[in-house]
Image (tube, helix red, strand yellow):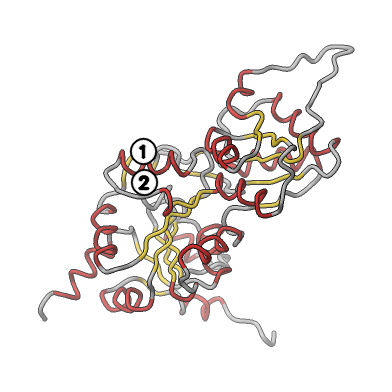
Amino acid sequence: MAGEISQSTVKDKCQRLTPQTTANLLDSVDAFLFDCDGVIWKGDVLIDGVSDTLDLLRSMGKKLVFVTNNSTKSRRQYAKKFHSVGISVSEDEIFCSSFAAAMYLKVNDFPIEKKVYVIGEEGILEELELAGFTPLGGPEDGKKTVHLKPNNFFEHDKSVGAVVVGLDQYINFYKLQYGTLCIRENPGCLFIATNRDAVGHLTDLQEWPGAGCMVAAICGTTQKNPIVVGKPSTFLMDFLLQKFNIPTSKMCMVGDRLDTDILFGENAGCRTLLVFSGVTKESDLQDSSTQIQPQYFTTTLSDILTLVDNTKSPL
């Protein structure tokens, strides 16, 4: 069909990192944006060689930014986690989807007198409070139960003006009912999703259900689609551009997922690098049905360290 780009043509544009392509990439960008789970660590285990690679990039004058869809932590909590695995990162370098949810409400002038119901964890609660909002729910409601008996009426706060849904290991029937009632019955109540990731590397050995399954549950009960503030939405990119004043053409998004990280970079006009240390495997990239393609791919982030060393070796 006229105008179509064949799959082979698309894949031809996807380059494996080599000493030469690595040099080209490093010469062309001023900032690297990193996903965390599956790129920097798996669960609480740092991926081999990551710390030295980040040190190398900093020594070359590259700006490093960490953009994660995991909403369980705030920027402060993420900085603490980075330090616990031996990497020094400031809160200003971290852009997590819990922060994105709070900032979405702030930039859209969400009424300060309205409350926010959270199906999620401490990270969302902390970022909402820092932004000046009043959150309800979170882990505390994970301990609550419902009583399905005659004449039982489930009460909810009519002043809730937004429901934020993120990754929640404490999700239960109580939270689902509370969030559903707020969205369906409170006039103008917003339905915000931190992200819709299907799975995530919450431990080093396995993938676990991601925020997408919690979001899907609320979509099912409300028959509404959420406002998504995390990757691949480019909402966070507005903050990056404001803060660092670096054009997206000079940025490279590094991630382990095609449908969030790589699509986020592509949508924003960044260069993209896919690593196979997390969710996506090389066989997935080679699959003929795969439509999203990174500009570069490699096994793990630390390959950059090895490939840069190779360019310095004498012939």
Horizontal and vertical percent position of residue 221? 79, 37
The reply to whether the C-beta atoms of the residues labelled 2 and 1 are less than 8 Å apart is yes
Residue that appears at 59% across and 43% down? 131
For label 2, count other residues whose C-alpha is less than 10 Å away and answer few (under 14), some (14-19) or many (20+). Answer: many
Q: Quadrant of the N terminus?
A: bottom right
For label 2, the residue is: 41
SS category of the residue bearing label 2:
strand
Horizontal and vertical percent position of residue 293? 51, 69
Q: Is residue 163 above or below residue 258?
A: above
6 to the left or right of 60? right
Residue that appears at 86% across and 35% down? 185
Kindly indicate the quadrant of the structure image that contains residue 165: top right
Horizontal and vertical percent position of residue 162? 73, 41
Determine which of the numbered discs, if any, sits on residue 56 in the image. none
Residue at far top of view: 150
Name the amino acid, label 1.
Answer: Asp
Determine which of the numbered discs, if any, sits on residue 44 in the image. 1
Horizontal and vertical percent position of residue 291? 58, 68
Residue that appears at 66% across and 26% down? 172
SS category of the residue bearing label 1:
loop
The answer to which of 164 and 40 lies nearer the viewer is 164
